[in-house]
Image (cartoon, helix red, strand yellow):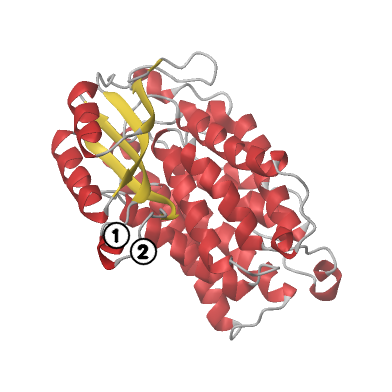
């Protein structure tokens, strides 16, 4: 893939890396993922061939974008805070995350927002720091992270941003940011191409990873929103299984009879560790990530600090939901428990979900 080189001063006048650009990014990503959800679903065969990666990513990004659309215009200093804007979007995404891909996107967004707190514009050094934080958090959220997935794409993007930042000696100019965004999308594209050879399931089906393609689209939307350029549709041309005439690969894969359980729950660090360990024993695709900071306590003594709890977003695939739900309830009071069949495609209007 060839990216158009930056044109120095001319292109710099287009660059807008402020809070409004972040809102444009997520709005653009919502539209793009909506348009591409069918093709992403078609090649979704890992970790489960349930054909819903595109739908899950779209619905999760939509939640993030909607949180910003619904917010009243803020002319205060916080309204110009890039980190605050992304944090708000990330919290909404985390609370409403769907599936593996949606949950990892929410983790990515929340983590990327942290080093941007208090900043009024994105720069190449900040982009490098934010992407590095995001990829580390995403890898650690999974009990058993696997290369050749969305995680590898995030890691490649972060390394590219760090490389450009080092080459530019920490330059925070618009020009350096443009170079960094170009490198991030190029690295993400190359990482997506590599996914086919990194996972046996993908190699056998001759397709690239659906979640990885979704993250590539998200990062290209970021580049487009900040640089004021068109999306690079050519980055999809050489992705195996992604042409419109290609069949829905997942429909020919063995069905998984298990279920996906998701919820939000407040837990102490100890109980969170216990829950992760027990869920690992019950099933797979365990993802646990904090939602926001420490919850306030009525007491200010040392004991209450030790027992401080955090809100967690929990995701797991299990053969039977009952033991998992019982375990979760034994450790706290979960909210928004959703149980979905893995063997069925899930859509916003007709997704089979069960309340507990």
Q: Residues within 10 Å of mark 2 (few under 14, many from 20)?
A: few
Q: In which image quadrant can residue 19 be found?
A: bottom right
Image point 24% across, 23% down: which residue? Answer: 321
Quarter that holds the N terminus: bottom right
Identify the residue at image location x=36%, y=64%: 300
User: Marks 1/2: CA distance?
Assistant: 6 Å
In the displayed structure, does residue 213 sit left or right of residue 70?
Answer: left
Which residue shows up at 56% across the image and 54% down it?
87
The residue under the point 17% across, 47% down is 274
Rendered view: 345 above or below 189:
above
The circle on residue 300 is: 2
84, above or below 241, in the image: below
Q: Which mark is residue 304?
A: 1
Q: Is residue 148 visible?
A: no
Residue 319 appears left or right of 289: left
Q: Nearer the viewer, residue 166 or 139?
A: 139
Is residue 343 in sight in this rendering?
yes
Residue 350 lies, in percent from the top left, at 50, 13
Tell me the quarter of the image containing the C terminus: top left
In the rendering, at what x and y percent does residue 47 appear?
A: 31, 35
Whether pointer 1 and pointer 2 mark residues with C-beta atoms closer than 8 Å, the reply is: yes
Image quadrant assignment for residue 174: bottom right
């Amino acid at each position: 893939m060839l990216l158009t080189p930056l044109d120095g001063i001319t292109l710099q006048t287009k660059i807008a890396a402020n809070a409004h650009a972040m809102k444009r990014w997520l709005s653009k990503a919502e539209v793009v993922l909506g348009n591409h959800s069918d093709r992403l679903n078609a090649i979704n065969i890992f970790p489960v061939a349930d054909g819903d990666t595109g739908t899950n990513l779209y619905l999760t990004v939509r939640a993030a974008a909607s949180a910003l659309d619904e917010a009243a215009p803020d002319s205060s200093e916080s309204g110009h805070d890039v980190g605050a804007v992304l944090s708000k979007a990330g919290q909404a995404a985390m609370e409403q995350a769907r599936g593996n891909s949606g949950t990892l996107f929410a983790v990515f967004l929340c983590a990327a927002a942290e080093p941007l707190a208090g900043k009024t514009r994105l720069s190449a050094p900040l982009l490098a720091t934010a992407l590095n934080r995001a990829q580390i958090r995403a890898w650690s959220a999974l009990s058993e992270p696997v290369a050749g997935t969305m995680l590898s794409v995030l890691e490649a993007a972060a390394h590219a941003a760090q490389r450009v930042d080092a080459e530019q000696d920490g330059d925070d100019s618009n020009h350096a940011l443009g170079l960094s965004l170009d490198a991030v999308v190029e690295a993400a594209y190359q990482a997506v191409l590599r996914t086919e050879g990194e996972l046996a399931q993908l190699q056998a089906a001759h397709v690239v990873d659906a979640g990885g393609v979704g993250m590539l689209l998200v990062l290209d939307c970021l580049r487009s929103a900040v640089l004021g350029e068109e999306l690079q549709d050519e980055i999809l041309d050489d992705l195996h299984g992604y042409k419109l005439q290609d069949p829905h690969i997942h429909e020919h894969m063995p069905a998984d009879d298990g279920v996906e359980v998701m919820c939000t729950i407040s837990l102490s660090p100890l109980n969170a560790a216990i829950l992760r360990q027990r869920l690992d024993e019950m099933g797979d695709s365990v993802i646990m990530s904090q939602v926001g900071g420490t919850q306030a306590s009525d007491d200010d003594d040392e004991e209450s600090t030790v027992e401080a709890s955090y809100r967690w977003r929990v995701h797991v695939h299990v053969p039977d939901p009952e033991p998992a739900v019982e375990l979760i309830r034994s450790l706290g009071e979960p909210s928004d428990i959703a149980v979905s069949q893995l063997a069925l495609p899930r859509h916003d209007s007709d997704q089979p979900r069960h309340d507990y």
